Amino acid sequence: MTSARDIADGVTGREKTGPGAILFLCGMNAIRSPMAEALARSILPAGTYIASAGVRPGERDPFVDAVLAEKGLTLGERLPHHLDDLEDSYFDVIVTLAPEAHHRALEMTRTQSVDVEYWPTADPTIARGTREQILGAYREVRDALERRIRARFGQ
């Protein structure tokens, strides 16, 4: 049964299936996509291949480490990956989290049988204020991604 939150997040019950390979793609692979990758790894079955990348080079963001640690997750020594750095280019689903990533995914998959889904996700770097207020913006992104991953991939 589809919940009100699923409907709000744009997910219907028939979409809740488990793909074998998922790519989370955003602008610089510094915030949204590595956060989604870490969350998905903690939620989805171990046999699911999960990767993330950016369409431009990026640098690791310490606020991501802080909000993931609150959930007992870590990126370890992982640094941002550029789309060209991926070892494997076959995915069942590419989830784009920023407009430029969505356009790039559509371009690169024109001749491939892959689902491309756009999950518009706020950029928490625009948050201003105290450290706690900025962390709050990152937590909102983390929690929204977690809800969306659970709703879409059925875990």
Image (cartoon, rainbow, N blue to C red):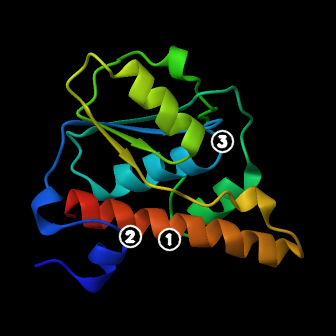
Q: Foreground: 88 or 127? A: 127
Helix, strand or loop under label 1 = helix
Provide the secondary structure element on which disc 2 rests: helix
Comparing 67 with 113, the one in front is 113
Q: How far separated are the C-alphas under marks 1 and 2?
A: 6 Å
According to the picture, the residue beneath numbered tag 2 turns out to be 147
Q: Is residue 109 above or below residue 117?
A: above
Mark 2, residues whose alpha carbon is within 10 Å: few (<14), some, or many (≥20)?
some
Task: Classify 113 as above or below 99.
Answer: above
Badge 1 is on which residue? 143
Residue lying at 19% horizontally and 67% vertically, measured from the top left: 12
Horizontal side of residue 121 vs 64, given as left or right: left
Secondary structure type for disc 3: loop
> What residue is disc 3 on?
30
Q: Quadrant of the N terminus?
A: bottom left
Measured along the vertical axis of the image, is residue 126 above or below residue 114?
below
Mark with earlier residue (2, 3) = 3
